[in-house]
Image (spheres, grey):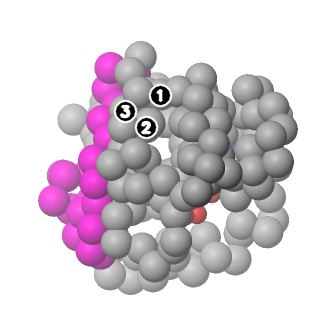
Amino acid sequence: MRTAVYPGTFDPITNGHIDIIARSAKLFDRVIVALAVNSAKKTLFTEEERLALAVEALRGYENVEVKRASGLLVEFVEGEGAMAIIRGLRAVTDFEYEMQMALMNRKMREEISTIFMMPHERYTYLNSTIIRELSRYGADVSEFVPPCVQAALRRRQEELRGA
Ligand code: ADP
């Protein structure tokens, strides 16, 4: 059983993330989407909301699970009996940060490899920050996120406007 872990904040999950997950699910027996829950990042969606949206968006993938991950990533990966960490590489700008993390993780656990994947080019400029910005101004994000995320973004913007 070959298991890979795909970690991230997923605030919210986008079609770019799902593209990487779909590719990984073909290569590994089991893919665990690890939702970072203790990051210092201030998120638009709560931990429960991010988890529920990822679960809903990934319903169709039988070998994909979504789990909360706190603490050191390599410890989570080890605990799941996984052998690989999946990360998406969109552009050169991702490279430096990703390389540092991959090398640091390898220094801590030599047996765990980081695998980088490129999404379809239509998603290379996509990130959760841009989606949050677009939705703040009422732009149509249907091309970039699954329907459940689109609905959640609309609700959140209405709440924020009403507050
Ligand atoms: P983080 O907070 O660690 O950056 P994210 O949830 O933003 O986590 O992203 C998780 C992973 O998904 C990262 O490897 C990131 O590079 C990748 N990713 C994000 N958006 C896309 C995209 N549009 N296409 C491919 N990979 C992506």
Q: Quick check: 62 above or below 6?
A: above
Question: Tag 2: residue type?
Answer: Ala
Magenta span of residues: 61-85
Question: Tag 3: residue type?
Answer: Val
In the shown orientation, is residue 7 left or right of residue 112?
right
Is there CB contact under 8 Å for labels 1 and 2?
A: yes
Q: Residues within 10 Å of mark 3 (few under 14, many from 20)?
A: some
Label 1 belongs to which residue? Answer: 57
Q: Residue at x 32, y 41 (%)?
A: 66
Q: Residue furthest top?
A: 60
Q: CA distance from mark 3 to mark 1?
A: 6 Å
Q: Residue at x 64, y 36 (%)?
A: 154
Q: Position of residue 72 (x, y in %)?
A: 29, 75
Quarter of the N terminus within the rendering: top left
Label 3 belongs to which residue? Answer: 55
**Relative to the observer, which residue lies in front, 143 or 78?**
143
Q: Position of residue 74 (x, y in %)?
A: 30, 69
Disc 1 CB within 8 Å of nearest ligand 1 atom: no
Q: Is label 2 in a helix, a strand or a loop?
A: helix
**Relative to the observer, which residue lies in front, 143 or 7?**
143
Q: Residue at x 82, y 48 (%)?
A: 137
